[in-house]
């Protein structure tokens, strides 16, 4: 199925489901995702659709999101239950799969892990994770630095974003999902330890 054929339909859906600023953000993330996909070799069509839909349940009532996850037999960890800002990623994946009929695992995974990241992310999942940080309207401290990192590599951008996020969460005594920690550790191992091992064999 060519999901891009449904882009206008998805936009119309999002314009009704999301607050105006969130709708603009979703359009911007889709554009950033296409740019990164083209730069790093991911599927541009999938990137656009995943970018559009990554926040599809962001403005949904929390009780509705919780029921959606229960209906899909998702069991929340303590960290997930008490960190409701993570819910839209999980409920969004459920909505995209069960309501919109999207079956592509890469698109679904990109929606599911766009907030926390995780170890073993696919290229498309990394593209959406980074696109969410660099979309045009983003103006948080060091947003321009993040965009510069994204020009170097997805991994460099991810390390920078995780350092920013983990520092901000810990300073404000907020919960940190283990997926984010595992993603960070994987990136550091790949950047430093595996590189050293390879150099030692040369």
Image (spheres, rainbow, N blue to C red):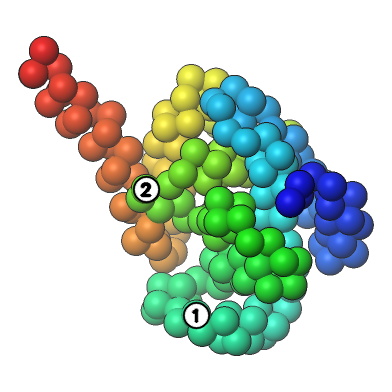
Q: Looking at the image, do the residues carrying marks 2 and 1 touch, with CB atoms under 8 Å apart?
A: no
* Looking at the image, residue 56 lies above or below residue 91: above
Residue at screen point 66% across, 55% down: 54
**Can you say whether 86 is above or below 132 in the image?**
below
Q: Residue placed at 50% from the left, 80% from the top? A: 74
**Residue 36, x across and y down, in percent:** 61, 29
Cα gap from disc 2 to disc 1, whole angstroms: 21 Å
- Give the x, y percent position of residue 124: 55, 41
Please identify the quadrant where the C terminus is shown. Answer: top left
User: SS for tag 2?
Assistant: loop
Give the residue number, with chain letter if any, for mark 1: 74
Query: At numbered mark 1, what does the secondary structure look like: helix, strand or loop?
Result: loop
Q: Position of residue 108 (x, y in %)?
A: 59, 58
Quick check: 53 above or below 73? above
Is residue 93 visible to the viewer in this orientation of the structure? yes
Task: Say which residue appears at 67% left-offset and 28% top-offset.
Answer: 35
- Label 1: few (<14), some (14–19) or many (≥20) C-alpha neighbours in 10 Å: some
How packed is label 2: few (under 14 Cα within 10 Å), some, or many (20 or more)?
A: few
Disc 2 target residue:
120
Q: Nearer the viewer, residue 186 or 73?
A: 73
């Amino acid at each position: 199925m060519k999901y891009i054929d449904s882009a206008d339909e998805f936009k119309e859906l999002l314009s009704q489901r999301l607050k105006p600023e969130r709708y603009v953000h979703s359009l911007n993330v889709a554009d950033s995702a296409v740019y990164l996909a083209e730069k790093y070799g991911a599927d541009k069509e999938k990137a656009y659709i995943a970018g559009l839909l990554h926040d599809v349940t962001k403005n949904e009532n929390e009780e509705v999101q919780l029921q959606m996850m229960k209906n899909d037999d998702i069991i929340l960890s303590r960290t997930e239950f008490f960190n409701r800002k993570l819910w839209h990623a999980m409920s969004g994946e459920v909505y995209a799969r069960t309501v919109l009929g999207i079956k592509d695992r890469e698109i679904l995974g990109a929606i599911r892990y766009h907030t926390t990241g995780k170890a073993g992310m696919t290229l498309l999942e990394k593209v959406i994770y980074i696109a969410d940080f660099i979309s045009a309207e983003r103006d948080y401290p060091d947003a321009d630095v993040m965009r510069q990192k994204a020009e170097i590599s997805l991994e460099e951008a991810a390390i920078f974003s995780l350092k920013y996020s983990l520092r901000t969460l810990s300073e404000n005594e907020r919960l940190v999902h283990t997926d984010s920690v595992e993603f960070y550790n994987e990136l550091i191992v790949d950047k430093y330890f595996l590189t050293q091992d390879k150099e030692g064999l040369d």
